[in-house]
Amino acid sequence: MFDELRKNGFDVETRNHAGAILSVDFPEIAGELESALQDLSIPAEELIGSGGGEAPSTQRLRKRLYEENWPKHSFDFRMIVDGRETVSNSHEIDHIRSTPLGKVALEIEWNNKDPFFDRDLENFQRLHAQSAISVGILITRGASLQDDMRGIIQRCIEKHGFIDEAEMVDAFGMKDRTKRQRDAVQRMIDQHTPFAEAFAKHFVSDKFGAATTHWQKLKDRIDRGVGNPCPLLLIGLPASIIKS
């Protein structure tokens, strides 16, 4: 499964027999997901315009999943002993795909603080322990995208010929940035760094830094066993989905 994704540069890993479960019990679900990801394309301009938040193209991926019966769902748990409720909690999952054989849970962590991975994996673990889900899926920025993010932003600015941030606010609908952010870029320019390079370096460090959700941060947690023994599918979005 997911060979086409791998050929196109996606990071794909499975844990705890997730591949076997998806291929035997949920092949239709796997096909839906692969098709949606193959169609995903993000213009580089959206990365800047979103200010580091979820790009509109990623929001379109969510919309497509919702349209294909992957709705948001909140799981409620209650434990009642002798008529008295002793435990009550809930776990909200952004996308749940249900079939007669079970449920598959999916979260997209495009650009959050990396502890959100702990939350997602621990939710998957609890839900699986209660037989509420069969597989948990996490999608995040892949290794190639994280590594090339600065170059992507710089090349986009150079392509448009921008020489200051005001032009990008007008062209991309970029949120006006703080004085601290603008001053940091200006200091690099004062040291003879070209605007595109200075902006890209600071923007990526500020918005897509090492402490945000990306492939290596996810792998670190998986390698430590976070989320075990829930079957897991991990997908990293590659640099190839960015259109310059």
Image (cartoon, rainbow, N blue to C red):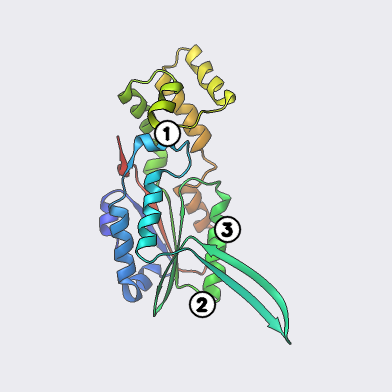
The span from disc 1 to disc 3 (Cα, nearest Å) is: 27 Å
Q: Amino acid at mark 2?
A: Ser
Looking at the picture, how far across and down is residue 192, in whole percent?
45, 12
Q: Residue at x 67, y 79 (%)?
A: 79
Few, some or many C-alpha atoms within 10 Å of disc 3 (few <14, some 14-19, many ≥20)? some
Give the labeled residue for mark 2.
Answer: 131
Q: Residue at x 35, y 70 (%)?
A: 22
Looking at the picture, how far across and down is residue 69, in whole percent?
38, 66
Few, some or many C-alpha atoms within 10 Å of disc 2 (few <14, some 14-19, many ≥20)? few
- Report whether 126 appears left or right of 198: right
Q: Which of the 4 quarters of the picture holds residue 15? A: bottom left
Q: Nearer the viewer, mark 1 or mark 2?
A: 1
Q: Which secondary structure lies at badge 1?
A: helix
- Report whether 137 appears left or right of 117: left
Q: Which secondary structure lies at badge 2?
A: loop
Give the labeled residue for mark 1.
Answer: 48
- Report whether 92 appears left or right of 215: right
Q: Nearer the viewer, mark 1 or mark 3?
A: 1
Q: Amino acid at mark 1?
A: Ile
Give the labeled residue for mark 3.
Answer: 119
Q: Earlier in the sequence, mark 1 or mark 3?
A: 1
Q: Amino acid at mark 3?
A: Arg
Q: Earlier in the sequence, mark 1 or mark 2?
A: 1
The span from disc 1 to disc 2 (Cα, nearest Å) is: 41 Å
Looking at the picture, how far across and down is residue 241, in whole percent?
31, 44
Q: Are marks 1 and 2 in contact (CB under 8 Å)?
A: no
Q: Which secondary structure lies at badge 3?
A: helix
Q: Residue at x 53, y 28 (%)?
A: 177
